[in-house]
Amino acid sequence: MKKLLTVLFAGFLTLSCMTGNVHAEESILDYSEEISMFQDFYEHPGKYIFQDSEGNDVSAFVFQQKENFQRDAYHTTDFLMETVKSVQEETPAATTRAASKSKTWNNLKVYFQKNRYCIYSVTGTYNVSGGKITNGKAVPKIVDRKNLSYNISYIGNVISKNGKTITFSVRHIALVSSKVTVTTKHTITI
């Protein structure tokens, strides 16, 4: 009986260790794309705008993690992706047309989990009177759902800095394991 219990206990420990290793391997996330993005940001700080789930700019917070990132890119990226929910790449693709008074932001990412995101674009239009922005609206568009149940909608805008800036707010909702809501903000300054 003692031998049987010893064999069963040894089998249980072996099974527990094997299950633990499988679980540990499954919990390692693929951050290759995000690591490349952060590396690019640290080399060219003005290239990206990072926002949290409420649309607040957290680019300065991301930049403060540069030394940690250089020491341990994977774990720093894991830490940053707890906060970063939106990535806007400032490239020529984000065009501003003075004649039509509009700006389009293309290939934007909104994160619903640390390495799961959807891609969207936003076109913001505005009117100017007396050298000041008087009103505007934005039209968001889903580019790639990445196999997620994802919806996007325009919330509204805020005009600030004596009519020189308009910020459009967009709401993103996805069903991942539960409902996740992220707000992003997109700004035009004249």
Image (cartoon, rainbow, N blue to C red):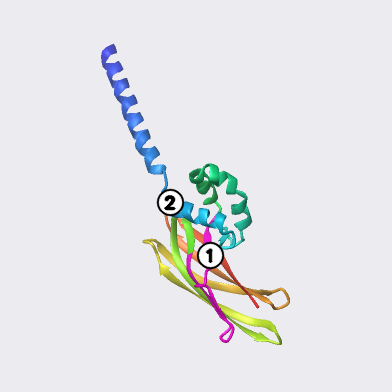
Report x, y in % for residue 128. Answer: 65, 85
Residue reaching furthest to the top: 2
The front one of 120 and 96 is 96
The front one of 113 and 104 is 104
> Which residue is identified by label 2?
32
Q: Identify the image quadrant of residue 137.
A: bottom right
**Rendered position, 133 above or below 116:** below
Q: What stretch of residues is rendered in magenta?
A: 84-108
- Please check the rendered image and state whether residue 99 is part of the magenta-colored stretch, yes or no: yes
> Which residue is identified by label 1?
88
Residue drawn where x is 59% and y is 48% of the image: 65
- Please check the rendered image and state whether residue 89 is part of the magenta-colored stretch, yes or no: yes
Mark toward the start of the polypeptide (1 vs 2):
2
Q: What element carries label 1?
A: strand
Q: What element carries label 2?
A: helix
Residue type at the position of mark 1 = Gln
